[in-house]
Amino acid sequence: MKALTFTLISQPKERLDLSGLTPAALAGLSDIQVARLRIGTRRSPVAVGDVFKITGKDVSNIVFEGGSARFDKIGAGLSAGSMRVTGDVGCQAGRRMSGGSLCIEGSAGDHAGSCIINGRMEIKGNAGDYLGGPLAGEQIGTEGGILIVRGKAGDYAGDRLRRGTIAILKGCGDYAGYRMIAGTIVVCGRTGAIPGYLMKRGSLLFDRRPENLSPTFLPCGEPEIAFSTLFDRFLIDEKIMDRALLGSKPGKYGGDNAVSGKGEILFRKRDR
Amino acid sequence: MQQLSRNGILVDDTFAEAFGMRATAIIITAPTLRWARQAAITMTGYATSVIGCGCEAAIDVDLPASKTPDGRPGCRVMIFAMGTDELQKQLKSRLGQCVLTSPGSACFAGLDGTASLDLGNSLRYFGDGWQISKKFGGKHYWRVPVMDGEFLCEATTGLTKLAVGGGNLLFLAADNTKALNAAERAVTAIEKVPGAIMPFPGGIVRSGSKVGGKYKGMMASTNDAFAPTLRGVVDTSLTPDINAVLEIVIDGETSDAVAAAMRAGLKAVIDFGPKKGALRISAGNYGGKLGKFHYHLKDLLS
């Protein structure tokens, strides 16, 4: 059966809330019912059929042909099945998804992967600020799953991460791992100011020695640990990376000692 | 007793009687195979028989770096006990005293079972608050800081209720050297069978036992029917040409593993021949009433 495909007719004139277009929400609906679903966020009731041409029947496999920075909350609440967007998306993509896979072939806006519980989300372009992070007032960010950004991420990536893995492959902005509770953030490329700021526990894994580190992170030598090679294998097995990130003897900083100080920054030593 | 003959060696028409057990397996890795094996050997020391040791344990196979979770050389260790609680107790104490303590070691689940037993879940407290929990790839690990870095340990391992303990072979020979020759050949062959271990020293036991004894409280006592020095004075199973008997005891992850191991041992000893090895091969049983699993030697001759 062909994937249920939403082909963008023209760039939307308003921000769209696409959280209702997931396999679970669309199951059992006819094409006409789907076309009538309201996705507009202004007072005029823009419906799915006004913006997209709908083809295909396989609701467990949803494709958006074309993208826009106005596609908000795409894949939000996804619990099973797969979703793919061939272009850019707006904010809160994949928010609170709990299973399945979401692939964004373009770039994503702020709060991409916000509070993911499980599943796999991949952004082939760049991501905005607060990658995986909670919205204002929420206590916990991402709680599980895998969130991959093949390009760059903005500031505050992995804010309040609780569990799971976030991988950013071309560098990130300031405060990566801000207020992290636990979990793992991988960053290849340059990191901005003060990574791990106020992190309680968890791991920041870098492919190079971090610059602009807070003075509340203290060097902890370069222990030979089995975890780094185990995690390197996981990254390769999951096709997140194609080479080892840390090696068997990474450098380590412990912090943030401004809070409990049980977190760590592990980084690949380049001077070997 | 009827006997078959293969390559000049008599094979008794009898069977090994074995019991259902609980088993688990772990993978121990280290910077070198030597240190992985050292941790495994230490952990499986004093684990020959459930009668006195609480569990039976040994190395199943050595694993190359490409076959272990962390890409370092390692080995798979199997542990057998009569009940789940005892198995958990033995696993926890042996892991804590023998693997956690061994230089560079790490420990992973070696079995996907229906139920699970704690590994790192019970050792993490050694970290005194500095232990790190990591969940990725559908698995849960604990990282415990130690003096040479970290002890990495998976949180749990699997438990199987399909395990079988007590498969055995008896090698009867003209003298001790020949009995040992035969038994060593069998051990080498059985070591290659996956999912089967031989918990006794070097895989071999010289003090085969019978159930009970004349003294109160003895659960097992010497197998006098196979003791050559008592040949004249007890109801012996030995003919005059036999002066030494050695036994191999096999525990398997499944009944098939035990059968495969016995088959491999039988073949190795028969191929070795009677001149420098065993004159006769037998097996131990309790009349067939105690153990659920019976392995008839004649069925295992390939």
Image (spheres, coloured by chain):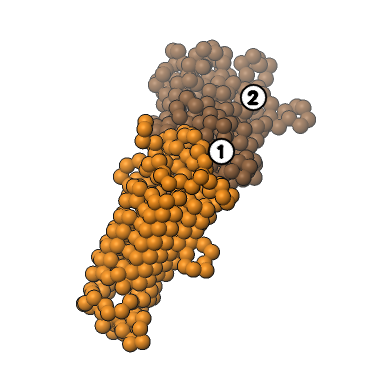
Chain colours: A orange, B brown
Report the disc number at residue A216: none
Question: Image point 61% across, 16% down: which residue?
Answer: B228
Residue where numbered disc 2 is placed = B223
Question: On the picture, is B25 further left or further right than A124?
Answer: right
| Residue A85 location (% of width, % of height) | 28, 66
As helix, strand or loop, the secondary structure at mark 2 comes to loop
- What separation in Å lies between label 2 and label 1 (alpha carbons)? 49 Å
Both marks 2 and 1 on one chain: yes
Q: Indicate which label's residue lies in the foreground, 2 or 1.
A: 1
Disc 2 chain ID: B
Q: Chain of mark 1?
A: B
Give how far across and how far down residue B97 sits, in percent.
62, 33
Residue B57 occupies quadrant? top right
Residue for point 21% across, 77% down: A9
Q: Is residue A80 above or below residue B137?
A: below
Q: Earlier in the sequence, mark 2 or mark 1?
A: 1
Name of the residue lying farthest toward the right = B216
Residue placed most toward the observer, A144 or B65: A144
Looking at the picture, tell me which residue is in the foreground, A76 or A114. A114
The disc labelled 1 sits on which kind of residue?
Pro
Q: Secondary structure at mark 1?
A: strand
The reply to whether dot 2 and dot 1 touch (C-beta < 8 Å) is no
Instruction: For residue B59, say whether it is visible.
Output: no
Q: Is residue A235 visible?
A: yes
Residue B295 image position (x, y, % from top left): 50, 36
Image quadrant in which the N terminus of chain B is located:
top right
Question: Closer to the camera, B144 or A99?
Answer: B144
Q: Which mark is residue B145?
A: 1
Q: Quadrant of the C terminus of chain B?
A: top left
* Other residues around mark 1 within 10 Å, as few (<14) / some (14–19) / many (≥20): some
> Within 10 Å of the Cα at label 2, are there few (<14), some (14-19), or many (20+) other Cα atoms?
some
